[in-house]
Image (spheres, rainbow, N blue to C red):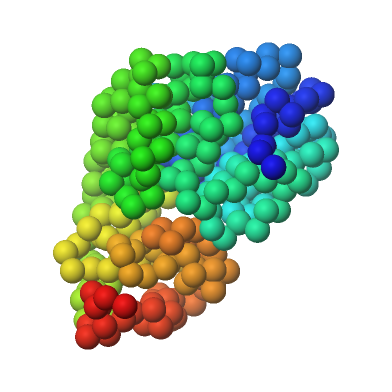
């Protein structure tokens, strides 16, 4: 059954939106795009948006200063819309609002999503959650500000329209958003390519200390807490490192470990053509997409890398079997 936004919003007086912890470009883009649209098209509805601290680079999107980073335990919403979340736990601090809401709605494109809300719009083949948000809206009523947010989200999750998730429909939606008069070049430059000095320093450390393993088919790098403290870096400053590692010639899989506590790592996985990293992440309790996934794992960095590469090896074809027609 097709989801109709007007039906979801009917008789709602108080609505909350929330995205995943450590919000990235698609999370911020989809949340802000829908938030701005609801504020403009449903002015009679009290609408709030909950996210962890929005990375500074995304401040060019209108109304990011309205994002709430804390919840009031007494707040109860008629509807909670979660975006870009594979499960409720990924909502982080706003999860209690989701659990107390009269009704819940999830918009997502993670293949690991098991449809945990009352209403679910989950399309794993979509390029991004921002693309899915666009399909729910009346295109003629999308403002320039909302279009900027959605365009940013699509651009980020497609690697600026380079990844395999970019479909003809994705490009057509991007074109529709561009026709709203947005400065697409500025959005991409300021939110995707431009890096701070600290971001470049921490990227340099990650590249310098990276290693090729598994017959040079896999590249791995680890950033520890003491390095983050030395560079005065925030988790958002690590955005894009694993994608840069993935670009290494001859590499099929990139593994990036960020130490978030002693013996605890946030693991980001990216692959090119052969390995389904979502399957590996799900095996260890994480999730994501076929070519981009993540998971939190405990143990030494060596233990984590050994466990991840053992699952990669199960999918890795021998050279004699590669590129052979079935």
**Residue 309 visible (yes or no):** no
Q: Position of residue 307 (x, y in %)?
A: 44, 80
State which quarter of the image contains the C terminus. bottom left
Residue furthest to the left: 249
Residue drawn at point x = 38 percent, y = 50 percent: 165
71 over 179 or under it: above or below? below
170 over 283 or under it: above or below? above
Residue drawn at point x = 36 percent, y = 45 percent: 166
Residue drawn at point x = 72 percent, y = 37 percent: 80
Query: Within the image, what quadrant is residue 212 found in?
Result: bottom left
Q: Position of residue 161 (x, y in %)?
A: 31, 42
Q: Position of residue 215 (x, y in %)?
A: 22, 81
91 over 36 or under it: above or below? below
Is 61 situated left or right of 113 in this image? left
Which residue occupies the foreground of this view, 296 or 233? Answer: 296
Which residue occupies the foreground of this view, 79 or 58? Answer: 79
Q: How many marks?
A: 0
Q: Position of residue 205 (x, y in %)?
A: 24, 58
State which quarter of the image contains the N terminus. top right
255 over 118 or under it: above or below? below
**Residue 99 visible (yes or no):** yes
Query: Within the image, what quadrant is residue 104 found in?
Result: top right
Residue drawn at point x = 27 percent, y = 68 percent: 252
Is 8 situated left or right of 170 in this image? right
């Amino acid at each position: 059954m097709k989801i109709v936004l007007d039906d979801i919003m009917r008789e709602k007086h108080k609505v909350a939106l929330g995205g995943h912890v450590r919000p990235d470009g698609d999370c911020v883009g989809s949340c802000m795009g829908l938030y701005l649209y609801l504020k403009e098209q449903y002015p009679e509805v009290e609408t709030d948006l909950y996210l962890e601290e929005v990375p500074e680079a995304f401040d060019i999107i209108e109304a990011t200063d309205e994002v709430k980073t804390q919840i009031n335990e007494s707040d109860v919403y008629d509807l909670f819309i979660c975006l870009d979340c594979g499960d409720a736990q990924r909502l982080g601090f706003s999860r209690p609002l989701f659990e107390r809401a009269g009704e819940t709605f999830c918009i997502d494109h993670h293949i690991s999503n098991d449809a945990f809300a009352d209403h679910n719009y989950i399309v794993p083949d979509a390029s991004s959650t921002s693309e899915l948000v666009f399909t729910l809206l009346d295109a003629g009523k999308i403002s320039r500000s909302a279009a900027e947010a959605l365009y940013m989200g699509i651009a980020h999750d497609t690697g600026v329209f380079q990844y395999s998730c970019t479909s003809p429909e994705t490009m057509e939606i991007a074109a529709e958003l561009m026709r709203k008069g947005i400065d697409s070049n500025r959005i991409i430059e300021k939110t995707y390519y431009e890096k701070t000095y600290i971001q470049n320093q921490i990227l340099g450390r990650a590249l310098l200390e990276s290693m090729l393993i598994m017959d040079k088919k896999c590249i791995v790098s680890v950033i520890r807490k003491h390095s983050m403290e030395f560079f005065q870096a925030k988790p958002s400053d690590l955005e894009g490192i694993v994608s840069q590692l993935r670009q290494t010639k001859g590499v099929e899989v990139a593994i990036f470990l960020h130490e978030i506590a002693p013996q605890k790592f946030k693991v980001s996985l990216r692959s090119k053509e052969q390995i389904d990293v979502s399957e590996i992440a799900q095996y260890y309790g994480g999730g994501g997409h076929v070519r981009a996934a993540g998971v939190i794992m405990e143990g030494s960095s060596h233990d984590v890398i050994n466990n991840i590469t053992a699952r990669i090896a199960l999918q890795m074809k021998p050279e004699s079997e590669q590129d052979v027609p079935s």
